[in-house]
Amino acid sequence: MTAVSLQCKIKNHHPEWSNVYNTTFIRWTTHNPKGLSDKDLDLATKCDAIAAELGELAPEPPSCEIRDVADKATTSAGDCCVPKK
């Protein structure tokens, strides 16, 4: 997470992420333009390279169950870019 956060700082990008024990979920999205951007894809590629350098296992193919867990983990706090009331 530290290595990825440094890349986020360099690229001025802020993904949504959560970490529990040895699993990190990262949601790469961009508010403008909406959806995925070249910056998202670049940083996702950097994550894969960092994981390979550190000897991490290749990620398992996403399943609907894992995707639901990731969605709940990253959306439970609400939208990070909407002012809190």
Image: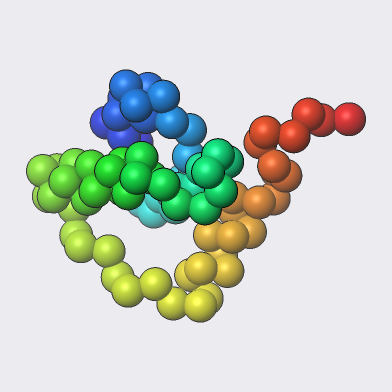
Q: Where is residue 27 in the image (x, y as percent from the top left)?
A: 48, 50
Which residue is painted at 30% across and 70% down in the image?
60
Based on the displayed image, in which of its 4 quarters is residue 58 positioned?
bottom left
Q: Quadrant of the N terminus?
A: top left
Vertical relation: 59 (above or below) 34: below
Q: Does 85 sit left or right of 77 as displayed?
A: right
Q: Position of residue 63 (x, y in %)?
A: 44, 77
Vertical relation: 65 (above or below) 38: below
* Applied colour scheme: rainbow
Of residues 40 and 46, the one nearer the viewer is: 40
Vertical relation: 44 (above or below) 61: above
Vertical relation: 29 (above or below) 8: below
Which residue is painted at 78% across and 29% down in the image?
83
Of residues 6 and 65, the one nearer the viewer is: 6
Based on the displayed image, in which of its 4 quarters is residue 4 positioned?
top left
Q: Does 46 sit left or right of 5 as displayed?
A: left
Based on the displayed image, in which of its 4 quarters is residue 53 positioned?
top left
Which residue is painted at 30% across and 29% down in the image?
7
Q: Residue furthest front?
A: 33
Q: Position of residue 17 (x, y in %)?
A: 49, 44
Which residue is painted at 13% across and 50% down in the image?
52
